Amino acid sequence: MPDFFETILSGPGKYSIIFIAVAIVAWAIYMVFRSKKIKGDVQTFLSEHPDAAKAIIKGATTGTFTPLSINGAAPVLFSEGMKPAFYLVPGENIVEYEYAWARPGVMYKTVTTTVGPNKVSVEAEAGKSYNISYDKKAETCIFEEC
């Protein structure tokens, strides 16, 4: 087995291995800093709005619901368990979103359909949790209390 590693590391393949190792380390460092930034953004938002409501994105298996803006500002995203979610201030909120889903195609492997960006007005109460999703058949956004 040591001969195998010696052969790989003595030839031109060592540069590929070094590149892959550096890429993995850089990705891990990026993810740690990104996670800390997201936690900091959430803490800042919650300190400004301690009575914020949660909007949990439902139906991620059928498509991708992406909040683009909340009241004209970037959404404060976080994870509620394994589900993506974002915060809403109490009262009326304008949620700008995009919804996309893929299906098998005839000429291509998959065909992706995107709806939006659309805006919907939702009413959130302080401290409550809501589910938000998109109904493809009705072509509308669904916002309901958990």
Image: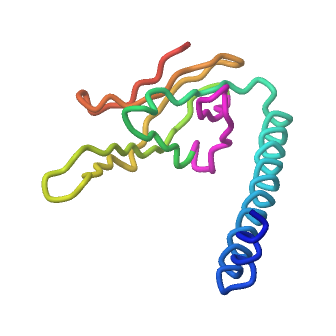
Q: Is residue 28 magenta?
A: no
Quadrant in the picture for residue 42: top right
Q: Is residue 9 above or below residue 101?
A: below
Q: Is residue 78 magenta?
A: yes
Camera-nearest residue between 96 and 92: 96
Residue that protrudes farthest toward the left in the picture: 106
User: Is residue 22 shown to the viewer in this render?
Assistant: no
User: Is residue 66 shown to the viewer in this render?
Assistant: yes
Q: Give the left or right position of residue 121, taking residue 4 as reference.
A: left
- Look at 58% across and 42% down and name the residue there: 70
Q: Position of residue 73 (x, y in %)?
A: 62, 50
- The residues colored magenta run 70-89
Q: Position of residue 10 (x, y in %)?
A: 74, 84
Q: Give the left or right position of residue 27, taking residue 125 as reference.
A: right
Quadrant in the picture for residue 14: bottom right
| Color encoding of the figure | rainbow
